[in-house]
Image (cartoon, rainbow, N blue to C red):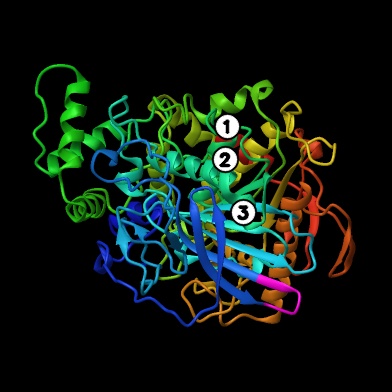
Amino acid sequence: MARNAALLIYFLVYFLVDPTLAYPRFIREEANDDIDTVVVTTAYGAVKGINYNISETVDLNIFLGVPYAQPPVGDLRLARPQHVQAWSPSILDATRHGPKCVQRIIREDPVLEGVPFSEDCLFLDIYATRLRTAPENSLQPVMVYIHPGGFYGGSGAKYNFTNLALKGVVVVCVSYRLDVFGFLSTQDDVIPGNFGLLDAALALEFVKEIISDFGGDAGAITLFGASSGAAMVSIFTLSPLTRGKFQQGIMMSGEALCPWAVFTPGRTVNVPADLAMEFGRRLNCSLSQTGSGKNVSRDLLACLRGIPVDTLVRESVTMQEQVYGGDQIFIPVSGDSFGVLPETPEKLLAKTSDLVAIPTITGYTTDDGSWLVPDLDDDGVTYPEFQYILNAYITQYFPPSERNETYTRVVKAYLPDDPASLTPLQLRGILVRLATDAFIVTHVIKQARLFSQAEDGNHRRNGSRPGTFVYQFNYRPSYSPAPVWQGVRHADEKGFVLGLPPGPNPFNYPNTTAEDEQVADLVTTMWSNFAKFGHPTPQPFNWSKHATLQWPAFGNSADNQELLQIDLDAKKRAFDRNQYVAAWTG
């Protein structure tokens, strides 16, 4: 198996990128008048969307590219987002997606024809079903989706929420600032960072204001997201700025506690303030050599606000690709002056009496970390390679004082006394389990335990105590392009939450099987049930050979931790990896 220094890069990169897509392609779409439209009136003005007649009794209305904030340009670049201004008396044309936020592009992403990149990108999409037989003022639960992409890529325009909306919910998808525009930070009050988080928080406020005009219930909002989007949902369950402003949360393959989700004090690799200054120097910004650190930060901010957007994007990509090997370096920070994360997620979660206990779903895929294991030749990994990758991870995400002890615990938990007796394929399998636990599982379980310990808050549904529901997604999609050994990969559940909408558009699913669609129906049913009732299975229902499938709440002790294993033979079972969680948490 050919190896070189790229081993570390393969393991630490959050999403690999295609160098040929190093910066945005600007593509403009022509208007399409051959559609049925619907107009909704809001406090900001009228909105024209697309109407689909699904059946004799059901209409689906889609509103694309609805602005929720002022364009974050000029003096609003690297600043708190500002509320959108009314567009009345004009009618807002919401029949096309708003632009994607400028970003470093994810290799797997197709180019979305007709959806340009722009710094003016704070838009949301709304999918709303309407039953013609329902009372005129009836409202449906709302599900607000925060898209994934490692905090540097992705867009709400990639996703089609038609099939989920047809389950009787209003779905809103939020786009937010990414990469340096959303997460560059000098770790002071000049460029505090977390602008992407502030965008999504403002979008939530906007949704609460206007969603009843689209048939949504502003008092029944479920935030949900995958990967980095899930981490943002998790952050919002803890943040004083958003806590209590939504009723439920769904976190798929990501948590605020995940080491890649938030930079916390004590770590010495990829320090945000150092990265910000390095970025400025690469752009030839003139930075103060004397005076306080804030003077340097002010110089940097003034410089960055005066540089063309495409230059910023190009230099960001160059820095990340050529200097940091594709690593995910611009992420949320704790201790920001905005108060999004005034303390680390660990400290906020430890204050269980202060948590507003809300119903949550959280989970992971069976092989969530498999894509992080470098084995292009499909012949396994050697023990020196195993050690190298483990050390690289611990160095990246643990402070120096904890590294040796963590390494010792982890090796003892995962490897036999004689690791040399293992074959390369066996070592690869152990490394997949290790990466899955280190990046996702440990933090999902830790947050689930703490949430289940939290005191009952003010946000109850149907008079019952909020529950925490944990899943393991164990179904490999038929359309997965990954090698078989990678199993059920990171965020493989995402398409099933969408309900596998048919193609041919990008990120739709034209080549699915009956088994895929069966699992998708189960997942969309449970996720929409959760939005409606605060419980994914409020009543037992028939599924496969388990005639009374019901998802149990996750307890806070090792002998009371049941999860739902989701696949063709979905069933509840006990969580069985406590010894590995202990190895990572100490």
Q: Is 57 contained in the magenta span?
A: yes
Q: Which residue is mark 3?
A: 213
- Which residue lies most toward the front here? 89
Residue at mark 1: 238
Q: Is residue 160 left or right of residue 316?
A: right
Residue farthest along the top direction in this orientation:
291
Callouts 2 and 1 close, C-beta under 8 Å: yes
Q: Where residue 384 sits in the image (x, y, percent)?
A: 39, 51
Residue type, label 2: Ser
Residue stretch rendered in magenta on the structure: 54-59
Residue 84 x, y percent position in the rendering = 42, 45
Label 2 crowding class (10 Å Cα cut-off): few <14, some 14-19, many 20+? Answer: many
Q: Is residue 237 visible?
A: yes
Q: Quadrant of residue 58?
A: bottom right
Earlier in the chain: of badge 2 and badge 3, it is 3
* Relative height, residue 442 to residue 568 (above, below): above
Question: Where is mark 2, residue-wise?
Answer: 234
* Picture mark count: 3
Which residue sits at x=42%, y=49%? 176
Q: Secondary structure at mark 3?
A: helix
Q: Is residue 246 left or right of residue 31?
A: right
Q: Quadrant of residue 115?
A: bottom left
